[in-house]
Image (spheres, grey):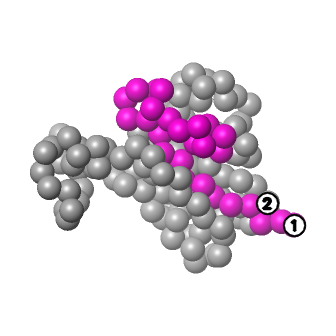
Amino acid sequence: METGRVILVPTPIGNLADITLRALEVLKAADRIACEDTRHSAPLLAHHGISGKPLVALHEHNEARRAPELVAAAKAGETIAVISDAGMPGISDPGYRLVQACLENEVPLEVLPGPSAVITALIGSGFPCHAFRFGGFLSV
């Protein structure tokens, strides 16, 4: 069977309109969508007219267990879109273990460009942006 792929899709940070056309195309075409929190993702998808897709929870408490399942689905030909509650999956959000599993199992992996709280904050800070370090988000 043809190998599918895993696509990391950034989501808006606050404003639902801040999503790219390409992200919407991927979400509409995906066979299933892995979400950090399906209750949080469902309104975003509904807002953009995306329905009827299986939503699978992928969060810090189940990612180690869920990653092999998603890799197997991609190897069976499915296209899996991965979204976090806001921003880029894998940056202080689930996705890291799944990316590792894809690379280890030679599953095609694509990362779409898009919103990042880190870059948005850096640009808005007025600090020089030619070099910076990100050590994680502050605890609230």
Residue 139 image offset from top left, x and y in percent: 18, 46
Please tell me which residue is depicted at 14% across the width and 55% down the height of the picture: 128
Q: Residue furthest left?
A: 127
- Name the residue tied to disc 2: 77
**Quadrant in which the C terminus appears:** top left
Residue 18, image quadrant: top left
Disc 1 target residue: 1
- The quadrant of the rendering that contains the N terminus is bottom right
Q: Where is residue 40 in the image (x, y as percent from the top left)?
A: 48, 31
Question: What residue is drawn where x is 54% and y is 24%?
Answer: 43
Q: In this view, does 41 lie above or below 139?
A: above
Q: In the figure, residue 38 lies in which quadrant?
A: top right
Say which element carries label 1.
loop
- Crowd tier of the residue under label 1, counting other residues whose Cα lies within 10 Å: few below 14, some 14–19, many 20 or above: few
Name the residue type under label 2.
Answer: Gly
Q: Where is residue 104 in the image (x, y as percent from the top left)?
A: 58, 77
Provide the residue span drawn in magenta: 1-27
Relative placement, left or right, of 68 versus 140 is right
Left or right placement of residue 58 versus residue 68 in this view = left
Task: Say which residue appears at 60% left-offset and 55% top-offset.
Answer: 7
Residue farthest to the right?
1
Please tell me whether residue 31 is drawn above or below residue 104 in the rendered image.
Answer: above
Three-letter code for the amino acid on which mark 1 is drawn: Met
Q: Residue at x 66, y 40 (%)?
A: 25
